[in-house]
Image (cartoon, grey):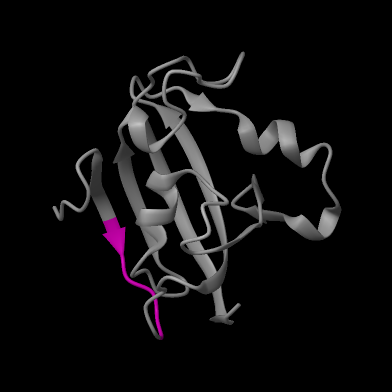
Amino acid sequence: MMKRLSGLKILDEREGEGQPAQKGDRVIYNCRIFLNKGDEVMLNAKQADHLPKDMIRVVDGERFVDRKTVLGSRQTIAGVEHALMGMKAGGYRKVRIGPHLAYREKGIPDLIPPGAVLVVEVWLRTKMEKA
């Protein structure tokens, strides 16, 4: 187990191929979010109904949203952004994220309670050159 930031712990990891993603890289990733008790936060399912079909990826019957971000730009929660750092295309990480690197004391109404510790599965689908 590799520990990075305080509040981010890698629980499982499969290495992808190519160059590791780093700050400034534009990436496409998928994720599944679980509460620490194990219940999945149904964010993909809720968003998939409202997004264009070309943003939806189906893997083993599960619907995923292809999310895009530039690493270091703070377009996604800090814990996910840090989990993506160093990943290679096709790679997978399962991480535990403390509330201060996720949704803090706000949470997301009806989805994530305030102060929640999250377990997030992240797949790095592709990495493009610097934005």
Residue 27 falls in image quadrant: bottom right
State which region is magenta: 13-18
Is the magenta region chiefly helix, strand or loop?
Answer: loop
Check the image and report above or below for 125 versus 4: below
Residue 125 position within the rendered picture, expressed as x and y whole percent measured from the top left: 55, 68
Taking the view exactly as shown, the residue that stands out farthest to the front is 73
Total labels: the figure holds 0
Taking the image as shown, residue 51 lies to the left or right of residue 73, namely right
Q: Residue at x 38, y 18 (%)?
A: 115
Q: Is residue 7 above or below residue 70?
A: above
In the rendered image, residue 101 lying in the magenta stretch gets the answer no
Residue 120 rendering spot, x and y as whole percentages: 41, 41
Residue 48 occupies which quadrant of the picture?
top right
Of residues 72 and 8, the one drawn nearer to the viewer in this rendering: 72
Q: Is residue 113 above or below residue 7?
A: above
Q: Is residue 104 above or below residue 82?
A: above
Q: Residue at x 54, y 48 (%)?
A: 76
Looking at the image, which is closer to me, 79 or 131?
Answer: 131
> Quadrant where the C terminus lies?
bottom right
What residue appears at the point 59 percent right and 51 percent down from the top-left corner?
Answer: 60
Front-lying residue, 73 or 35: 73
Query: Where residue 83 appears, x then y in whole percent?
Result: 36, 55
Is residue 14 found left or right of 102 in the rendered image?
left
Residue for point 34% across, 31% down = 100
Q: Position of residue 52 (x, y in %)?
A: 86, 52
Q: Is residue 9 left or right of residue 21?
A: left
